[in-house]
Every structure is written in structure tokens, then in C-alpha cells.
Image (cartoon, coloured by chain):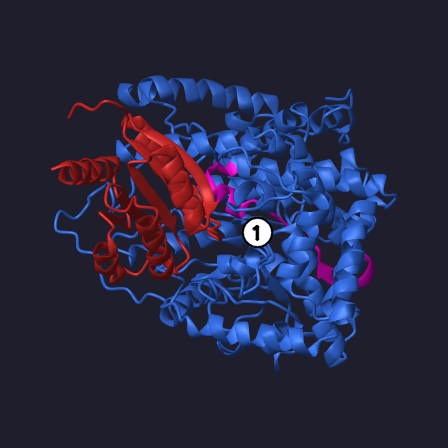
Amino acid sequence: MTRQRKIKVLLAQFALETHSRGILTVAGMLRDAGMEVVLIGNALPEQIIGTAVQESADVIGISTYCGGELALSEDLLKTAEKAGIKEQTIFLLGGIFPPEDAPKLKEMGFSGTFLSATKEEIVACIESALASKKG
Amino acid sequence: MSDEKTTKEILKEKFKPGEHIPLYNPEALKKIEQEFDKWKNTVVREEDRKNWKVMPHTILGSEIPRELTYTPLSNSDFDYERDLGFSGSEPFTRGIHSNMYRGRVFTIRQLYGAGSPEYVNKRIKMLLEHGATGTNWALDLATVQMFDSDEPEAKGQVATVGCPFDCVEDMETVCKDIPIDKISASIVTHYPRNTAIVFPMYLIMAEHRGVPWDKLPGSVQNDFIMESLVRSASEYIPPKDDFRIQCDNIEFIRKNVPQWNYVTLNGYNLREWGTSGVTEMAVAVANAIEILKEMIRRGHDVDWVATRLAFFWAPANDFFEEVARIRAVRRLWYRIMKYRFEAKNPRSMWMRCHVQTSGVSLTREEPMNNIVRAAYHALAAILGGVQSLHVDSYDEAYSVPSEEASIISLRTQQIIEAETQVTQVVDPLGGSFYVEALTNDLEERILDEVDEIERRGGIVETVTSGWLHKKVASHIEREQKMIANGEIKVVGRNYFRDPNLKMPKVWVHQYDDSIREQMRQKLARIKQQRDNEKASSTLSALKEACKRGDNVMDYTLECARADVTEGEMRRAFTEAFGTWKPPLFA
């Protein structure tokens, strides 16, 4: 795939998440795969979407370990819709969450949800989601 | 940095043990050397000779090369009195108590707390009925990050991974019918600010129940490394102010709650975030040194402070490294206390520790294997002579533990204690050529990393500058690559992975949003019932105390007494100190 610019990924955690081993690991993987990573750490849904707009991020990745991801993801996607970026942005979520929430998150608008994944799996997910958005 | 000497330099100058009596006589060593060379060059296969030293690669490991075998030559200078001594005696390598587990078995202290205060109270009572000998409470994310349950940030996070504490009433609910003067409570208030806010709620609860503070056994964490380095958060205060609150808490608790352990230097979460076992210990020791220097600066005697310092470690996969590491840091801590700080009370020289087995070393794949892993981690810790233990549950990679999983963790400890007989003999691996060589090596490496931190300006400076944050980030990145390319073998994940692997159905803790609503209603009621003028004047007094440099806990105690909530106190701290941007995030 040839692109004008690098794929830009915004990585964030919900406001109170304390764990960052996952997000730092994924940041390393994606940089390694040639993507541009903007790591903002903890933020409210409005702050995440605000930064995504400012940065023109192609992808928003959320790292979550402590539950509550359904309620918070719903807020995130609603905010994205209001800001008019929901359609063109790829949403990913990874970490620890009940596996039965994965289909609910997909339905909400997440292109990928990961309980554990290799670099290749995450990159493939981003590339195919971007391709289908374009198509 | 100042021209102040580093700990390593001071130890080099002052460490003068008595007469040096090497255990192995030179004649014997010479003979062993000759035979060893002969054996190595004739009996040992060429391939093994070439690969005499191998590098162990494990998750969170220290990458210390290991030889094919160890002999007296590996530690030819071995001096029994200087290096080991007897348990309960200097240099405490073999343990801090003479009889170790025969006198008192390690405390079985399983961490728990997901749910409402009422539910956590029941769950703690269940663990006590099953033989737990101490309690260990996890706080929920909102409480850890010092937000009230009704703040917007707390959405989705109330009571998910711990218990919510907004005010004194929650503390009363959790402790209902628990004999707080007999059962020691470990309250996992990770951060100094969190400790300054939540611990006074415990004290006021005790006051309401008529239990004098000097009867309360337990511990808080109170570690600025956790708040300024390890955690991720949306809001930080400058590390130097955080370090000061850590010291304020220590000072207050030491004065007013004499049986309470006021700081648990938490290597655990740092290591689990992503460092080697050496860095884990070096950072905790460097923080402990800085605390003692500050307490001396405040005019306290080093023995007044040091007798209740405790450490918290993360035993992981490399079995002998884990055993040796605990022995090594015990000896190093003794040397630091005796020779750098010139402590007089032997208790000040004790490296007392709690451990929790490593969670990051567990896998999501084939989770039952984690029962085996955690048992090895626990065994290493016990062979190392720890005081207190939490065994991680097999479902760690899925959720907070189910009741079944937490009982298996409890049983793991009981099996080690009652069936394996390993607790009958003190320091059973002492004297092993291998373990002693590794212990020496690890002690040196830990001290070298303490030295590096001090040369870079000390623990507060290496946090503020982001040097430690970057060290961890690069460890995580490198380790991930080694797992991806198979250099680090993880059974069931990248080593003998089942091609038809299916993730089993594991019970996962379900988030109950009604708890947040219940907490919100309680907060609304409290704010209506309390004397709001009193609440706001205690908050103003807290802010002033922060700016003036007074001990903050004297003031948070008054806040708690006036039913001020956790979030209100957090904001007072932030307003007084301002915020700090951590170095890893844009």
C-alpha cells in the first residue's frame, strides 16, 4: 500500500487507568511498523476526540485494564460522531475486558478488539480497516 | 550533583568487617582449581565448554549469565561470618529472625477488594474464615487515583478492581465486625497523596469505634515512586512535593500510630510495569535512602524511622535469581543501615518484605498453567525468607480473581507451608555454591544501580527528569521483541503453543454500575449532613499547610473528621502544588 503520509495513531487510556505496560508495548510495535504514534496517556472521551481532530489521527487506540470499557467506549464513539470523525477514524481497543464484550464493541464501531495480539495482527487489522474505509 | 558521596562510596570507605577468615583454605582451592580445569578440559563436552556461560532470558529477568556449574572457586573469598552469619544476626543474609518460619509462618495475605464496601467486608471475613492471617485491601481505580465516585472521570471505574472509599463512612462499612486491633490490615494506598487522604479515614473509624491508635497493626504503601513513576494518570503533582508528602506521612504515622508500617517501598509494581529484578530493588533502595536522609534532615534519629520500613517485591520466573535476590538485598540493606546510616537498633537493619507473585509472568493462554507458575514464584520467595505473601491467581490475565481462584492461591501457600516442609529449615539454600555466587553478584548489581541513580542526582531527580520512565519504556519495548521472536520462551504462548488453542471460558468479574449510583447517593447525603463550613475551613487549612511546609497528615486528619471527601482533598493538593507533566506522554 502506498500512502501520502505515515498512518497516524493516537493511543490513549480512559481517565483513571493506572496501567501503561500495554499501551507502551503497542506504541513500540506500531512505531516499529512505520506508523506515527501520538501517545497522550489518560484522558476523558472529549479530550481524546479533541486531540484526534487536532492531530488528524487515522486511528484511535484505547488501552483498558480495569473494566467499565463498554460505558466509556460508548461515550467515546458518541463524542467522535458529534465531532464528525467517527466514519473516517479506525477505533481499536485492547487490554483486559470480558471476552463477551468484544461483539458489543464491534457493533459500537470498533474495528479491532484485542485481549492479546502480536504486532502483525494489530498492523493487519489497521491496514485492512483503512482499506475498507477507503473502498 | 553535589559533592556528596554516593552510598557505594560511603560503603567502600566504612564497611570494615572484623578479621577476614576465608572459609576455603588456599590449599584446597588450589587443588579444586587444578581438578576443575582438568575436568572441564577432558570430561566436559566441547560444546558445553564453549557455551559455559548461558544467558537466561525470561520476562522481567536480569540477564545475569549462568555457568554450567558452580564450585567453591565461584566464591573463593567466602567468609561465613562476614557473608552469611546466622539467621536473626548480622548481616541477616539468612533471614531476619533466628527461627524464621518455625517461629512464625509467613503471613498469608491475599489482596482483595472488588465490589461495594458492604461486599468487600463480607469477602474479607470469608478469607479470614478460610485461614488468611492478615487482610490486604485493593482500592478501586477512582480511590487510587483520588477521585470521588461521583466525579465524571470515575464513570465505569467504581468498585471494578477494588473497593471505593470516598469518606469515613466507607471505611466503617468495610471494617464492620473485623477486629482491627488484632488483624493487621494492609491498605494498598499506593501513593503518598492517597495515603495522606485514605489513612486518616481509617484512624477516624478507629476513633469512632474506641480503638486507640497505638493498638492498630497494619501497613500502608505510601510510595512516591508509585505515584510519580509507575502509575499512569491524568493528573500529577511535582515529584519533589510528592516525595515530601511521603515523608510527612511517615513522620505522622511513626509519631501517632506506633504499630503501623508507614511505608512499603514498592518494587513490585515497578517491576511488573517493566524492569529487571535488579532495577526493581535498586529504585526501592534508593528511595529508602532518600527518605532516611530527609528524616535525618528533619531532626529525627535514624533508628526512630528505620525500624518499620518495609519492602514489597515481585518474585518472577528465574527461580534461583529470585531466591538470591531476596537474600542479596537483605544483606545490602543491612550494610547500608549499619555502615552508611550507622543505625544502632538491629531492627533498623532488617529488610522486611511482603511479596506478591508476578502477574506479568502469567499467561492468558492455558490459564491453569498459571497455578504452577505462581507456586514456583511463591516457593522461591519462601526459600528467600520473605515475611508475607500474596500468590497471584490463575485468572490474573482475565479479571480480578474469582472466589475459586483466590482460594487456590490461598491453598498454594498452605500446601507449601504444611506439606512440603520447606519452612522447617532456615535458609535452606544457604551455602550452595551457585546461590551464594548469585547472591554476591546480585548485591553488587543492585548497589551499582543505586549508585547510578545517586550519580544522576538522586531518586527524585531521576524521576523528575524522566530518566527512569525512559529506562522502563525501553525495557518493555525490548522485552516485547524478545517474546515476539521467541528468545524469551513462554509455554503455551510462544513455546509449544497449541495450534488449536481455544481460550477457555473463565469467570470474569462483571461491572455493576449500580454501585456507582449507590456511592453517588451516599456522597450527596454526606455533603448534606456534614457541617459544610467546617469542611471547607479544614480544606483551606490543608492548602495552607501544603504551602507552608507543615506536615500534611495533621490536616488531612481534620478533613476526614469533618467528612471531607477524597476528591475534595485531592483538589486541595493539586491547587497547592500545581501539576506536573510526566515525561512519557505527549
- Colour seen for chain A: red
Residue B508 sits inside the magenta stretch: no
Q: Quadrant of residue B134?
A: bottom right
Chain to which the residue tagged by mark 1 belongs: B
User: Chain B appears what colour?
Assistant: blue
In the displayed structure image, the side of residue B335 where residue B232 appears, left or right: left
Question: Where is residue B330 drawn, in percent x and y?
Answer: 63, 43
Position above or below: B138 against A12: below
Query: Is B249 left or right of B111, judged from the image as shown?
Result: right
Q: Does the magenta stretch include residue B265?
A: yes
Residue B575 in sight = yes
Counting from the top left corner in percent of width and height, residue B476 is at 41, 35
Answer with left or right where residue B198 lies relative to residue A102.
Answer: right
Relative height, residue B515 to residue B21 (above, below): below
What residue do we see at 12% from left, 51% from top? B500
Q: Which residue is drawn at 30% across and 50% down?
A: A81
Residue B570: image location, x then y, percent? 65, 55
Report the residue marked by disc 1.
B385
Please give the range of residues in magenta: B255-277
